[in-house]
Amino acid sequence: MQTQKQEQLEEQLEQQSQQLQEKSEQQNEETKVEEKKPLWREILSWVTTLGMAVIIALAIRAFVFEPIRVDGESMMDTLLDGEIMIVTKPEYLFGDPQVGDVIICHYPGRGNTNFVKRVIGVPGDTLEIRDDVVYRNGEVVEEPYLTPARNVKGFDMAPFTVGEDQFFVAGDNRDNSHDSRNYYYIGGPAAIDRSMIVGHVRWVVLPFDHMRGVE
């Protein structure tokens, strides 16, 4: 008799345990259903994440750095056609370009087309060129970055004074560069406005075997 009662009790306990387990599983399933987001919320979440990534990328490009491809031969042999440069922005957000800086700039009448040139004159400088030799404020400018074989056409330019908030730029391949010396829109020398300077060229990163700093 004692054994039969124990068996009945154990059977009841087992049934109760099974019922509790089934009830718990049912509650878990209901919770999962409740926690699952509607499709439109999933889509909104993805769109928001993507939008934030785009905004961050644009901010970095506008205010920190930007990769730009060299297009043309006007800066040979400092920069070669097809190379990828890293152009930094912060130094020109808080300061001005200096003589010798290699920059990315725009030209009047050319929209947002990027040009890569070297600053050879800053506001107040008077520049003159005699037989390819640059004079700044009456003194010969030493330009070790030039390749002599690319500077042999005997170019001359009468004295030109750089205006306030303007900069005078030239390509390192002087025999094959349209720049401030001979801007073809006006057929003579013309400085560019400070607002046309985009950033400072600091490094070449591609191709990998051409990686180097730019000076």
Image (spheres, rainbow, N blue to C red):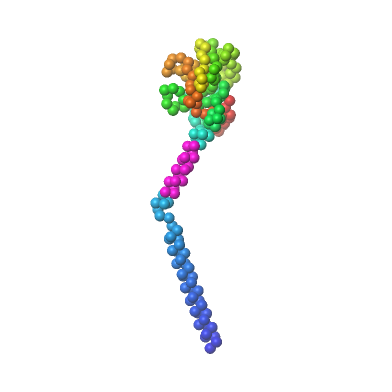
Residue 201, located in which quarter of the rendered image?
Answer: top right
Looking at the image, which residue sits at the far front? 164
Image position, residue 15 (x, y; %)? 48, 76
Q: Residue at x 54, y 11 (%)?
A: 130
Q: Quadrant of residue 143?
A: top right
| Span colored in magenta | 44-59
Relative depth, front residue between 190 and 25: 190
Magenta region's main secondary structure?
A: helix
Instruction: Kindly give the residue lying farthest to the bottom in the view shown.
Output: 1
Residue 106 sits above or below residue 36 on the image: above
Residue 157 painted magenta: no
Q: Residue at x 48, y 42 (%)?
A: 53
The correct choice, above or below, for 100 with respect to 39 in the image is: above
Is residue 55 rendered magenta in the image? yes
Please indicate, yes or no, whether residue 139 appears anywhere in the rendered image: yes
Res. 88 in view: no
Percent x, y of residue 163: 50, 18
Q: Residue at x 40, y 53 (%)?
A: 39
Q: Looking at the image, which is closer to me, 208 or 130? A: 130
Q: Position of residue 149 (x, y in %)?
A: 55, 16
* Left or right relative to 185: residue 173: right
Check the picture and name the quadrant holding the C terminus. top right
Residue pictured at 54% horizontal, 20% vertical: 122
Name the one closer to the observer, 68 or 104: 104
Number of numbered tags placed on the structure image: 0
